[in-house]
Amino acid sequence: MARILVPHGGTVRGGQVFDHHFGVNFISNKDEAPDGGALQAYQDAVNDLASGGPVSVRFPGGGVAENGDFTVLDDGAVLPGTHTWEFLEDAAANGWSVTIVLPTWRFLDLGSMTMDTATAAAEVETFARSLLAAATNLGVTIDGFEIGNEFDLMAEKTNGAAQLTGAEAQAFSDAYAAIAATMTRVLDAEIDAAGLDAAGDGDAPWIGVQALWSWIPDTWRKAQDFRDTLADAFDAEGAADAVDALIAHIYPWLELEANPQDWLTGETHIIDTLTATEAVFGGGLDWVVSEWEVSFGAGDAIETMKDHYDGIKQLEPVVALFTQMVAAGIDAMNLWPVRNGAFTSLETLNGEEKPLSYLFDMMSDQLPGLEVLDLNGKAPGVMWEAGDDIHVYGYEGDGRAVFYLGSRSDETRTLDLDFSAWRGRGRAPTVEVSWISVDDPEAKGYQQGTAIGTRAYSWAGFHADAAEILTFSPYEMIVVELVYRAGAGKTEIGTERHDLLFGSTGEDVLEGRGGADWIYGRLGADFIDAGDGDDLIWGGRHGDLILAGDGDDVVDGGLGQDIVELGAGADVFRDNGQRRFYGNDTIDGGDGDDTIQAGLGDDLITGGAGADVFDFGTVSQDIDEDTITDFQPGVDLLRIDGVDYATIEALVAAFAVYSDGTDTMVHLGARGWITLQGIDASGVAGVAPPPEGMRVSGSRRADRELDGTPFGAEIYGRGGRDSLYGRGGDDLLDGGNGSDWLHGGSGDDLLVDGRGYDRLYGGDGADRFQLGRDGQTDRIYDFEQGRDVIDLAAWGLDGFADLAVGAADGGWTELRAGDERLLLRAAGGDAINLAADDFLF
């Protein structure tokens, strides 16, 4: 397979993603609770999406806002007990901001085609004044006011035909212009009276007017006449300057399937119409798409639509449409709908989530703050087609680049991509790969079993296995994120139901609460508290603190030194298999019969109450040196390569077993050691005492793994760039020649740097760092003042006064004496205020 180079496109001017591109719709006849306000199911669904940031909710919906069971103006004044008040209370409790849709058809006399603007002015004045006061009282932000819903499409339906005569079209244009101008004038006055824009910073609620007839060319008479009518009506009301936004709805149907590249700007007239219409108001307006999706999920062609867009087949088209809208300059969007019987909804009315729900959640977590990339060069559109039926959409900013790769094929596809054009300067970026797939793409969307995963790779590791990593199941979405520098992290809080919590590139706080949650820490040292429920938890890269909580949880710690408390329940922990010091995890099983699958790294494992299984050889062949603090022979099991061992005698029959009178150590040969703390097996036949005088020597070349044992050992690197790891016991580590890496592990260790630029880690215990005289710069990364000591006898100094001590870049403390230089810091990265007691001379 030929490797394909990913082009390096530039960002699209004005194509930045914001939180308000991820707004949603409330539909009063679907989402309102019997006693008012939002159904708990709706609140949970929105809060799951909004767990990563604020969300704007359009109320009370689309067509229902004009002619449903109620319109907001039916409330009169917004007081406790009214529909609007009850919804605002829920918005306040959940931290939502709100857009209000004002009805217009109630004021239209179809016989005379005139609007009762006087009644409209009175009703809007009462409603807006009380609404703004209620919102201020409850602490709710009103994002804006949308005047009417799809007035043009509803006009088409009044004569039962798809076409209106010129006179009919003009009559509807006149009617809408009149009511919109009147409402705008009244709203502007009430917003000013409420003092919401006193600072003039633009934080007041916006007032939005529909861009009627946006689906026809702006040069046609219907569109031109409407703009002229708007100008006349708003000039008459003196309200032209009060308009802040133009409103449009976008549903491409199957046309997007035919042109995922530039359907919005290449085949529709929407952007041209918005541009022409905003000129009526002097330009500079926001463009708000208050409803959007591939389809609104109903109509004569519904079954054909499902064939193309149901379930996972909807993912790539939604990314295509979203990207096209942001690139075209759309400022805010509200997805349609959250809960509905329509196949395009995020979930069903029974709460069954669809693949799109997870994608939209992931996008809202990953994309705000980034800008759309034009990967298509001089050709129209921004999408790049890679291979057969794989569409690529790119975003960049905030120290990272994100690529959404969506398959449009019903067959397996494989890509071997080369991102070398995105290598950047300095250190190569980390590559984070996430994916959304299903078990049956031909099933109904809500019946497709969705699988989500994420994994971090080094730059070289990703490119070595790119063709395997980028193998797409039918219609799968794979996201490749290149992380040049970590972000600030964020806090996500779930609900009492099933949630997806998708972390960032920084240090996150992720709280699942109730429900069977899927929690992905991703990059950064995260704090994860899953709460109750049978949760799936992936810590991701770096050392995480994971509290699994009650329930039968499955925890994958990921890379880094993780601290994991599994809590109550029959839990499963899976080690990631990261070797040596970097994968040293601490796991506490808590109550319940747990299965702990240990791998590489020196892990400290406590089973807790219950009959636990300690599984070795499942996640990796080698295990390094693991310690179990509370193994109970006859109750717990050691499972090694699929074979269960319940007693010391059974272990002796299969492995070399040692005991020092306090602990018992099981040797799996070159694969590693298992220490059973608190078990004295010295009286068991076949158990040997600890070996003495263990010595490990390297070669004259670079030796990557010179490791110790649970007992004290002498480890010599000799020549080359060596890596020495003492592990347990009181060890001697001597790097010899070459620039070496030395880590003492636990115990009171002696670390001898030898010649070269050496990196020294004492680990736990009272360690001694013995520095030679070689004219090189050595570093100590975890000096523990009061426990560790630095031996400078070879430097030939009389005492502490002969040292030049100061601060160096990066938070290091610097020591100099002649040609010798040492940099050191504490384990947490802090500089140290050194004293004479820290040295031996």
Image (tube, helix red, strand yellow):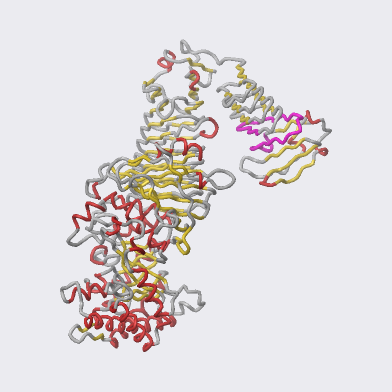
Q: Would you place residue 778 above or below residue 806 in this image?
A: above
All told, the count of numbered labels is 0
Report if residue 513 is visible in the image. Answer: no
Q: Would you place residue 161 above or below residue 293 in this image?
A: below
Residue 518 drawn at (x, y percent)? 37, 46
As for residue 778 lying within the magenta part, the answer is yes
Report if residue 147 is visible in the image. Answer: yes
Q: Would you place residue 511 above or below residue 277 in this image?
A: above
Name of the residue lying farthest toward the right = 798
Q: Quadrant of the N terminus?
A: top left
Name of the residue lying farthest toward the top = 685
- The residue lying at 45 percent from left, 74 percent from top is 284
Horizontally, residue 512 falls left or right of residue 458, namely left
Residue 378 drawn at (x, y percent)? 44, 57
Judge by depth and name the residue closer to the eye, 436 or 674: 436
Magenta part of the protein: which range?
Answer: 759-787
Q: Quadrant of the C terminus?
A: top right
Residue 234 occupies quadrant: bottom left
Judge by depth and name the residue closer to the eye, 371 or 577: 371
Residue 626 drawn at (x, y percent)? 49, 27
Residue 778 drawn at (x, y percent)? 70, 35
As for residue 346 lying within the magenta part, the answer is no
Judge by depth and name the residue closer to the eye, 426 or 673: 426
Label the magenta part by its dominant secondary structure: loop
Name of the residue lying farthest toward the front = 378
- The residue lying at 35 percent from left, 86 percent from top is 232
Horizontally, residue 697 falls left or right of residue 129, namely right
Judge by depth and name the residue closer to the eye, 445 or 99: 445
